[in-house]
Image: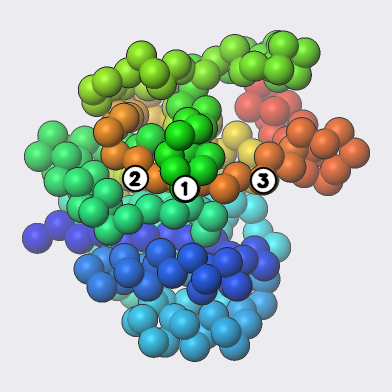
């Protein structure tokens, strides 16, 4: 029987994880692993122990890719994850139901999909779709998005009504078949917080794998969008990853 392993990274997100209560519900049927990128609080330890959630409380201040790669190796070595199991990257600020996860897994298994995502929204009412699926960017994409106030590479979700192949999907919610994640070498750790998801999807495409978007399976993502502030450290990380993505250095 195929199993689902859920990777969530906490960077000062312990309180959010406990209050959202999403992972406690998912842990009833799936293996949930929280990788702490900052020292784990007692509140989170208590929450994890009560819900049989695994905690990795070491190697702090890593990037998004490095953290999830650590979780993947832990799942293989400590929890017995096999190649036909599934590995879900799930941000702590995503609110998703057990029912949505059930339908996603059912679709992925029946269709034998390698990489999948769902329809993320900005609000709990699921009225404001997030631009979580996009076409691959070119070098001018960020500038065009800034000046036009609209991302030129976003798919129009209102026009997608069935499972569809897309270029790339946000790393806030990405489901991988375990064997595919391993063949891709996981996330490229040259990136730090930004473009890891674009890069792994681009490499997946080059290796013959599709990224499938399911419009009818929905969840909420309370994204911070901190890279939009030019004076922030997040923007500098974004800029560095942008250069790496387009130059390879």
Q: Secondary structure at mark 3?
A: loop
Task: Quadrant for residue 149, please give it.
Answer: top right
| Disc number lying in front (2 or 3) | 3
Residue at which label 1 appears: 124
Horizontal side, residue 107 vs residue 244: left or right: left
Residue at which label 3 appears: 224
Q: Position of residue 6 (x, y in %)?
A: 37, 60
Horizontal side, residue 168 vs residue 140: left or right: left
When the figure is inspected, residue 172 is found, relative to residue 157, above or below; the finding is below
Q: Secondary structure at mark 1?
A: loop
- In the image shown, does 183 or 157 lie closer to the viewer? 157
Disc 1 crowd, CA 10 A, few/some/many (<14, 14-19, 20+): few
Q: Position of residue 52 (x, y in %)?
A: 34, 82
Q: Secondary structure at mark 2?
A: strand
Q: Is residue 80 visible?
A: no
Residue at which label 2 appears: 175
């Amino acid at each position: 029987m195929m199993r689902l392993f859920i990777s969530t990274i906490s960077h000062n997100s312990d309180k959010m994880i406990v209050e959202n209560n999403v992972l406690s519900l998912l842990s009833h049927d799936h293996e949930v692993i929280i990788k702490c990128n900052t020292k784990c609080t007692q509140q989170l330890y208590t929450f994890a122990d009560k819900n049989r959630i695994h905690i990795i409380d070491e190697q702090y201040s890593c990037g998004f890719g490095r953290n999830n790669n650590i979780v993947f190796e832990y799942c293989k070595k400590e929890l017995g994850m096999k190649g036909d199991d599934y590995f879900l990257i799930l941000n702590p600020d995503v609110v998703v139901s057990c029912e949505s996860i059930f339908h996603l897994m059912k679709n992925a298994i029946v269709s034998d999909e390698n990489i999948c995502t769902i329809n993320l929204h900005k609000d709990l009412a699921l009225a404001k779709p997030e631009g979580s699926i996009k076409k691959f960017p070119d070098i001018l994409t960020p500038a065009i998005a800034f000046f036009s106030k609209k991302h030129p590479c976003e798919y129009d979700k209102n026009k997608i009504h069935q499972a569809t192949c897309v270029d790339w999907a946000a790393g806030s919610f990405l489901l991988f078949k375990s064997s595919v994640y391993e063949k891709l070498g996981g996330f490229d750790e040259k990136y730090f917080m930004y473009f890891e998801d674009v890069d792994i999807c681009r490499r997946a495409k080059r290796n013959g794998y599709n990224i499938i978007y399911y419009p009818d399976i929905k969840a909420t993502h309370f994204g911070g969008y901190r890279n939009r502030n030019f004076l922030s450290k997040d923007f500098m990380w974004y800029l560095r990853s942008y250069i790496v993505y387009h130059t390879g250095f």
